[in-house]
Amino acid sequence: MKIRRSFKNLFNKHFEWVALSAGLLLMAMLDPTSGSQTICPVERFGFEYCPGEGLGRSISLAFRGEFLASLAMHPAGIAAILILLGRIVTILKNHIITKQNGKLS
């Protein structure tokens, strides 16, 4: 039971920042020129329009330094990067502060 509790504690504290970091990394490695696959649940249900259409490609273009193309693909791409990076930094900062105050992390 102690191992299970330790795993659950680690999962609860680190899942969000690891998942956000992995998502950003995967979108950074995405080929923005290939539009063959979609993960949009709206399109998967058969609708033609997806509100986030091009967001992943926009993020990928921004990581490549093509900022104008990124904005043209989806105007929220660069903002999404900044928001996700801000959240990751906030989580990690809170973990560091908690450790420095002597609390268990």
Image (spheres, helix red, strand yellow):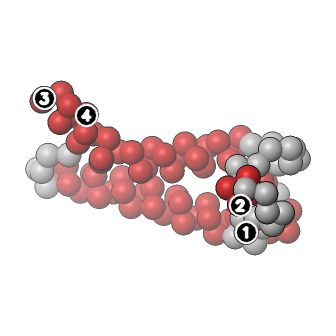
Looking at the image, is mark 1 or mark 4 earlier in the sequence? Answer: 4
Which residue has dot 4 on it?
A: 7
Give the Cα distance between marks 3 and 4. 10 Å
User: Dots 2 and 1: beta carbons under 8 Å?
Assistant: yes
Residue position marked by numbered label 3 in the rendering = 1
Local SS, label 2: helix
User: Where does residue 33 sit, x and y in percent of width and height?
Assistant: 88, 47
Spatial CA distance of label 2 from label 3 is 41 Å
Q: What's the residue type where badge 4 is placed? A: Phe
Of badges 2 and 3, nearer the viewer stands 2
Judge left or right: residue 77 versus residue 73. Answer: left
Give the secondary structure at mark 3: loop
Question: Decide: marks 3, 4 in contact (CB < 8 A)?
Answer: no
Q: Is residue 72 above or below residue 98?
A: below
Residue that appears at 20% across and 46% down: 105
Count of numbered circles on the image: 4
Give the spatial CA distance, label 2 vs label 1: 8 Å
Name the residue tied to disc 1.
Answer: 51
